[in-house]
Image (spheres, rainbow, N blue to C red):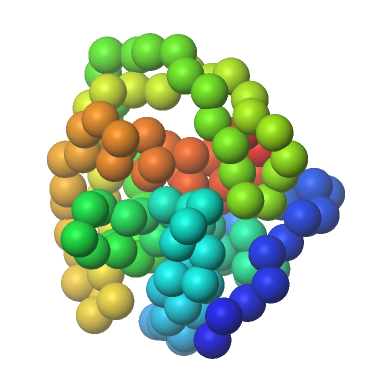
Amino acid sequence: MVKPIMKDVFFLGQKSEPATKADLQVGKDLQDTLQANRAGCVGMAANMIGVKKRVIIVNMGFVDVVMFNPVLLSKDTPYETEEGCLSLTGVRKTTRYENIEVEYYDMNWKKQRQKLSGWTAQICQHELDHLEGILI
């Protein structure tokens, strides 16, 4: 179901709680909501649709990947960039890393490990920040 985008910075600034198998619908809602906002959005965290759970979705070109309880395992090659966010007005400067490795549970609740680089890695890092209540 397409959900409204959360704009409340107090809510967005709170850390998210671990997701469980009972939160699979949150992943489906993120898929629907990202699709509805495709023109201006490449990733989302559950708190952006009003759910304080550790669930994100990242566009990886031809496919959107939902990640439950994602954990950043490694990062290298920092660079400075500017990012916008559907939940916030304007753009903000931040440091991101060219290469990352992330571990997460997929929609079948199977543990996955993936190395990401470039734009996809940047999107993932932005959404991971949302889970920690970091607004960029």
Q: Who's the residue at 80% across and 47% down the image? A: 9
Q: Is residue 52 left or right of residue 106?
A: right
Q: Would residue 26 be visible to someone looking at this image?
A: no
Q: Who's the residue at 64% across and 29% down the image? A: 91
Residue 46 horizontal/vertical position (percent)? 56, 64
Position of the C terminus by quadrant: top right
Report which quarter residue 67 is drawn in: bottom left
Residue 106 horizontal/vertical position (percent)? 26, 69
Position of the N terminus by quadrant: bottom right
Q: Is residue 56 above or below residue 14?
A: below
Q: Is residue 83 left or right of residue 103?
A: right
Q: Is residue 90 left or right of residue 46?
A: right
Residue 18 horizontal/vertical position (percent)? 51, 63
Which sits in the foreground, 35 or 72?
Answer: 35
Report which quarter residue 28 is drawn in: bottom left
Q: Is residue 77 above or below residue 75?
A: above
Q: Who's the residue at 25% across and 52% down the image? A: 60
Which sits in the foreground, 34 or 78?
Answer: 34
Q: Who's the residue at 23% across and 63% down the image? A: 63
